Structures are given as structure tokens and as C-alpha cells.
Image (spheres, rainbow, N blue to C red):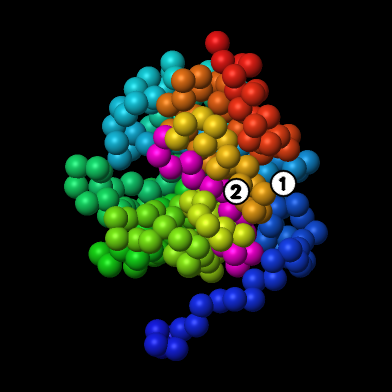
Amino acid sequence: MADLDELREGSEFGLGVVAGNQGYHVKGANNLPWGMKDRLSRIFNPKTNRTVMLAFDHGFIMGPTSGVERIDLNILPLVQYADCLMCTRGILQTVIPPDTNKPICLRSDAGTTILTELNDNVLIDIEDAIRLNVSAMAIMLAIGDPAFEAKTVANLYKAVDSGSRYGIPVMGVTAVGKQMARDARYFGLASRVCAENGANIVKTYYCEGFEKVIAACSVPIVIAGGKKLPEKEALELCYKAINDGASGVDMGRNVFQSASPAAMIQAVHGIVHGGLTPEEGFELFKELTV
């Protein structure tokens, strides 16, 4: 049992030192079986080792919030610019055409909504992920939430157990409650808990000192976009995260609530895969805005 009084904050992160045993292009996946690697290669471009994921699973807790009122009208035109789609099984089966041919990161837990206390989630059966031929399953963790931390960690390791059996990677999504500090110490803890419990990908938030969060996590981290920002600020967020070692982004509101969503996701793509600066990305956004 760890003695919290003797818990010392980490300081030796080996910043700038590449993680060892990396024969395969996705961080931490070198020893995984072929099926896992195949699915991860669909998500992470082997040429850049990065991904632009488009998240539009917001409706499962928020309903028809701005930008996702009509998935067929608002989201489908953006699919061609994304490397991976993150959505729920209901939307996938009813709106996304089967010939889209994009890897899917399936939201694989569900529970409470914004009308009650969030984070009281349960797992969806692994058979749905198999039937839907998804490339990953997304499971939320409420680290630091006294009521639901243990339950959501259990959801993660159960999903990892099932995913390992059938060759489907799991992405741990770190939730941030009202009482949780948005700093490197918290996100470093939450991300490490995801990796330690078997997650193959972690989705978390960018913060000051993010390079330490990246260095201490043995699997790829993609950043969440979070609340809607002005376009230039969102592109700066992408650039900083990538520059600090993130393996990509999983953005929703900063794309589909943009004044020009198609232009925005292409600008994000340019930063993540093309090495554009925030200024160059913003210029691209303005050029593509119609």
C-alpha cells in the first residue's frame, strides 16, 4: 500500500530520450499481436506516427448540442479529412455509411448525462465492437472522482481483457471533474493509470509541462480539444501538443463548432501531419474558408 505521506513527485522523465524497444511505429505496441498492430496502423499514419481523430460522440451525454444536431449534414462532410472517427454505436449504425472506409474508435461505455452526475458508466458488450469491425474502443476514466474512480478503472481493465482476447485496442479517456486540477501532475497520473491498466492509447488534455505527461506514459497520447476556442488558439493548442510529443488530436467542438468546419479540420491535419506552424495553419484555414 503506497504511503501518500512519502509519495514524492517524479522528476526524472528522460525528456528528449526516445522510448526503447520501439520496432513498431506505434509507441508501446511493439509486443502486441498482428491484429492489434493492424488496427493501430489504421488509426496512426505509419508515415508520421500521428492521427487526426474526429470526435462526435458528444450526443450520448449532451444530446443534440451545437454542431452535432444533424450528423448527416454536419459531420459526414468532414469524414474525408479525418484519420479516425470516434462515435457511438447508434450513430455509427444509423448515419455513417458502411463504405466510408475509415477506422472507428467506438465509444464503448455509457451511463449518466449532463442532467445528473456524470461518470457513472457501464461497459457495452465487446460483441458490438466485433460486429461493427471497429479499430478501437474508447473507455472513460474518472480519476479523482471518489464516487466513480474505482468503477471506471474497472470498466477499463475489463475492456482491455476483452479487447486483448479479440485483438481490439482500447483508448482510455481521462475525464476532468469540477474538483480535479488541470495540471501535469493530475494528467500525468490519469494517463499513467490508463497505460498501467492496459490501455493502448490515452486521450487527455494539454497542459503546462505536457512533455512530462508524454514521457511518463508508455503508450501514445492524443489530446482532447475541449471547449470551443477561437480557431487560431485551437491550432496553437494542436501545435504545442504535437511539439511536446503528442501522437495526434481527437477533436470535436473545435472542429464541428468552427465557422468553417471543413477548413478547420484540414488546418489541424496540416499541423499534425504536415508540420505547419500555427500561423501557417491559420492561413490555410482562412484560404479554405468559404
Q: Residues within 10 Å of mark 2 (few under 14, many from 20)?
A: many
Residue in the image at 65% along x and 32% along y: 279
Amino acid on which disc 2 is placed: Ala
Percent of width and height locating residue 200: 58, 56
Quarter of the rendering occupied by the C terminus: top right
Q: Is 176 placed left or right of 199 in the picture?
A: left
Considering the numbered disc 2 on the image, is that residue within a helix, a strand or a loop? helix
Name the N-terminal-most of marks 1 and 2. Answer: 1
Name the outermost residue toward the top.
290
Percent of width and height locating residue 92: 45, 30
Considering the numbered disc 1 on the image, is that residue within a helix, a strand or a loop? loop
Quarter of the rendering occupied by the N terminus: bottom left
Name the outermost residue toward the front.
279
Question: Is residue 26 rendered magenta in the image?
Answer: no
User: Residue 117, labelled with which disc?
Assistant: none
Percent of width and height locating residue 175: 39, 54
Decide which of 127, 95 is in the foreground and name it: 95
Instruction: Residue 53: name its quadrant.
Output: top right
Name the outermost residue toward the left.
116
Amino acid on which disc 1 is placed: Asn
- Whether residue 228 is visible to the viewer of this picture, yes or no, is yes
Residue in the image at 64% along x and 71% along y: 13
- Whether residue 266 is visible to the viewer of this picture, yes or no, is no
User: Residue 241, labelled with which disc?
Assistant: 2
What whole-number distance in Å separates the C-alpha atoms at marks 1 and 2? 14 Å
Query: Where 23 falls versus 78 (above or below)?
Result: below
Residue bearing the label numbered 1: 49
Which range of residues does the magenta coloring cover?
212-228
